[in-house]
Amino acid sequence: MEIRFAGQRPADADVLGFIVTKSSWDGFVFPLESSDAAHATAKVARFEGAAGQSFLYFAQEGGKTIRIVLLAVAEGDAGDYQKAGGELIAKVQTSGAKSVVLHAENLSAKAAAETAYGATLRNWRIDKYRTKLSETSKPSVTSLTVVGAPAEFTTLWPSYAAIADGVALTKELVSEPANIIYPESFVERCQHLADLGVEITVLDDTEMAKLGMGALLGVAQGSRKPARMLVMKWDGTGGAQEKPVVFVGKGVTFDTGGISIKPAAGMEDMKWDMGGAGAVAGTMKALAGRKAKAYVVGVCGLVENMPDGNAQRPGDVVTSMNGQTIEVINTDAEGRLVLCDALHWAQETYNPDTIIDLATLTGAIIISLGKEHAGLFSNDDGLAAKLAAAGIATGDKLWRMPIGPAYDKLIDSPIADIKNVGPRDAGSITAAQFLGRFIKDGVKWAHLDIAGTVWADKDGPTWAKGATGYGVKLLDRFVADNYEG
């Protein structure tokens, strides 16, 4: 969908969207042939301008029948404007309408941009494998024209568009089936980031073996798809920022559970067990696309966890890159094995002050927080507060969870330095404790367990059923607020 900016409504418009607030509704004057009729029709539908209300009706305008969409927001709430944009598209996406207009004469440039942003996010969907989709079910909207917004809109929009492009990449990677996206093809899907100025490095399984990444490679050894580590570097500071902030993503492109095999029911969902890596890739695209004035490195540990005759067994002991030995109690607790080597390598290579990992790590976090928040674990209160603030600002919400010595002893192994799972209690916490053992002294670290937030079973305000794109907006805002001044 193309986003346009214009001073007046295009002649081919077949949907007109209007955004109002509770305080502005009664006196709102529509730029229509009959503003009074619009108010009267809305009154019949009990539309009162209360935040979250929306209403669609048909009217005669310019000699043709068009759709009018009314959307009410809480004044000044960026999230509400994004939701309104998403609702506008959701109402007409498959309606046959092609040209949507957002009348923004009453909006600030930022509010107009937030609305167009929400519409862009909500418009994304994956239909490429649906060969028998009826014409009435296919998306029809080709453009959204923002009419009458302040000229500053054209200055603001490119950054919003870049972030939306990053979210779209994440949704794409998370949505694709595992026979299409696996470690090597994940890397290929990200190669276009080089065109934006991202420096890309790829470590293959041979190189990782030489580095001693026994934990990561142990997960991959049951698959015919070789492991990869994708490294994406963006420095928009010209060297002024001495150390990068590093994002590390779990990229298990499919997770059967290995020898500790998962139940068959629902296993198809494990194509999105690479949601952390997907979020990191999308964030790097967003940052590079908007030319962020920050130095950021994204690292994706990419493996497939399969149960063949060469797969690691429960009870095996592997040696991680930093030398710690790990007793593998459960091969389905594989994400932490991937991350521990990726985290150590990233610290050794880039010596960051701050490192943040994202992972669809535990089902336990869904039991704790549902799908409303991702779990936030951190060794630094300041870092945790900054991430939580970014989550509130973007709607990618976080909830801080505890870590500490009392939990740490739950993953002591009787035969190795550490075991990869603890008891049933505090499952997401002990997973975080495991990762914490691979963080160097003095490094600020946060672990985001995003298992409940990367995929949705129903439509949301800025996503269709399926991949949500969680994490991109969060990390982009964290960088903007804390590294770009």
Image: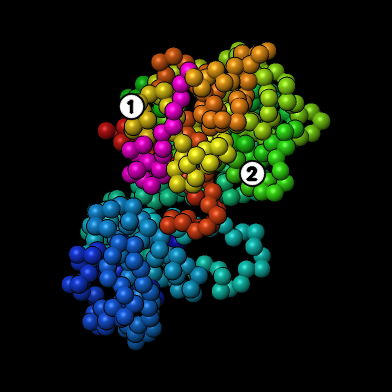
Residue 17 image-quadrant placement? bottom left
Q: Residue at x 55, y 54 (%)?
A: 457
Q: Is residue 230 left or right of residue 316?
A: left
Give the mark, 1 or 2, whose residue is nearer the N terminus: 2
**What is the magenta range?**
388-405
Q: For mark 1, what is the residue?
A: 382
Q: Residue at x 17, y 72 (%)?
A: 27
Taking the image as drawn, is residue 320 in sight? no
- Which three-letter amino acid code belongs to the residue tagged 1? Gly
Q: Position of residue 219 (x, y in %)?
A: 68, 29
67, 211: nearer the viewer: 67
416, 253: nearer the viewer: 416
Q: Position of residue 143 (x, y in %)?
A: 42, 65
Q: Indicate yes or no whether the magenta region holds residue 274.
A: no
Q: In terms of secondary structure, where does tag 2 sit? A: helix
Residue 207 image-quadrant placement? top right
The colour style of the image is rainbow
Q: Is residue 223 left or right of residue 114?
A: right
Q: Position of residue 282 (x, y in %)?
A: 48, 42
Residues at marks 1 and 2, CA–CA distance in whole angstroms = 33 Å
65, 459: nearer the viewer: 459
Q: Is residue 256 left or right of residue 406?
A: right
Q: Which mark is residue 236?
A: none
